[in-house]
């Protein structure tokens, strides 16, 4: 059963939401049969590259709030992250354009390393203060998860490589009416908006899984076991 996740590597709630989703999956006996797929979503396709401004300065300018208000907003997010074992370092964040990072994730998918690459980018941006639009940074992160350096450099040097895959995800998001992330779709039927509690993710997955599992159409009415036979023989209940 497939689970599709629309996200951006500079979206804090995408990172938090992913952790909660993973926690929900870990509680399910069939977690190995759940197929994750990460879909590209640029929060700001026109975002400039890192200018040296702090995240508080960037948020202040974008939303028309004070630096103090922006810092307070971020502190709330930091506390949410701690609840799922993440240590956000907002003081070192480098707001930037994420298109190259999305293309890199698509390349990683072609090499069977989509999840590892996505998670490495999240950690690098939110916990290590890495500049995730910088070529050398992306090359280093990619080789850490097992991608070949020469291949990564080739992909990053050609801005058309894996661009169509990124745009296809964004087109689908537009068709679905997705305007914010994280946005998780379970088996093409159930949509979960935002970094919901673990129980919400688990419930949606269980519902979808239950629809795939054949069930008896009958309602049993016996109050205790009757005399029955199976492959091991017949038995009279005591």
Image (cartoon, rainbow, N blue to C red):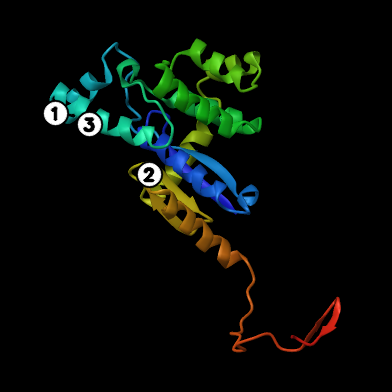
Q: Mark 2 vs mark 3: which is more N-terminal?
A: 3
Callout 3: SS: helix
Q: Which residue is mark 1?
A: 64
* Quarter containing the C terminus: bottom right
Q: Mark 2 vs mark 1: which is more N-terminal?
A: 1
Judging depth in this view, the residue of 11 and 153 nearest the camera is 11
Q: CA distance from mark 1 to mark 3?
A: 13 Å
Give residue 67's position: percent from left, percent from top.
16, 22
Is residue 49 shown left or right of residue 233? left
Judging depth in this view, the residue of 176 and 230 nearest the camera is 230
Give me the disc on residue 195. Answer: 2
Q: What residue is shown at x 57% (from left), y 20% (from top)? A: 142
Give residue 16's position: percent from left, percent from top.
40, 37
Callout 2: SS: loop
Q: Mark 1 vs mark 3: which is more N-terminal?
A: 1
In the figure, residue 114 lies in which quadrant? top right
Asked if marks 1 and 3 touch (Cβ < 8 Å), the reply is no
Depicted 153 relative to depicted 106: above or below? above
Packing grade of label 2 (10 A; few <14, some 14-19, many >=20) is many
Q: CA distance from mark 2 to mark 3?
A: 16 Å
Callout 1: SS: loop
Give residue 186's position: percent from left, percent from top.
50, 54
Give me the disc on residue 211. Answer: none
Give residue 66's position: percent from left, percent from top.
13, 24
* Quarter containing the N terminus: bottom right
Q: Which residue is mark 3?
A: 73
Q: What residue is shown at x 64% (from left), y 71% (from top)? A: 214
Is residue 109 shown left or right of residue 58? right
Asked if marks 2 and 3 touch (Cβ < 8 Å), the reply is no
């Amino acid at each position: 059963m497939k689970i599709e996740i629309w996200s951006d590597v500079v979206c804090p709630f995408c990172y938090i939401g992913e952790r909660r989703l993973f926690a929900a999956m870990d509680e399910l006996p069939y977690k190995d049969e759940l197929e994750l797929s990460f879909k590209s979503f640029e929060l700001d396709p026109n975002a400039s590259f890192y200018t040296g401004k702090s995240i508080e300065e960037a948020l202040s300018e974008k939303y028309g709030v004070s630096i103090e208000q922006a810092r307070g907003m971020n502190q709330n997010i930091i506390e949410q992250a701690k609840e799922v074992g993440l240590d956000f370092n907002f003081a070192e964040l480098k707001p930037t354009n994420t298109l190259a990072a999305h293309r890199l994730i698509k390349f990683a998918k072609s090499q069977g390393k989509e999840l590892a690459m996505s998670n490495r980018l999240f950690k690098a941006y939110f916990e290590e203060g890495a500049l995730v639009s910088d070529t050398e940074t992306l090359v280093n992160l990619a080789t850490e998860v097992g991608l070949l350096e020469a291949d990564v450099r080739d992909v990053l040097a050609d801005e058309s490589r894996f661009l169509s895959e990124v745009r296809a995800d964004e087109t689908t998001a537009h068709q679905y009416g997705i305007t914010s992330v994280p946005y998780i779709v379970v088996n093409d039927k159930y949509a979960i908006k935002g970094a919901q509690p673990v129980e919400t993710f688990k419930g949606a997955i269980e519902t979808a899984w239950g629809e795939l599992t054949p069930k008896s159409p009958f309602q049993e009415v016996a109050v205790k076991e009757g005399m029955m036979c199976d492959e091991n023989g017949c038995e009279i209940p005591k």
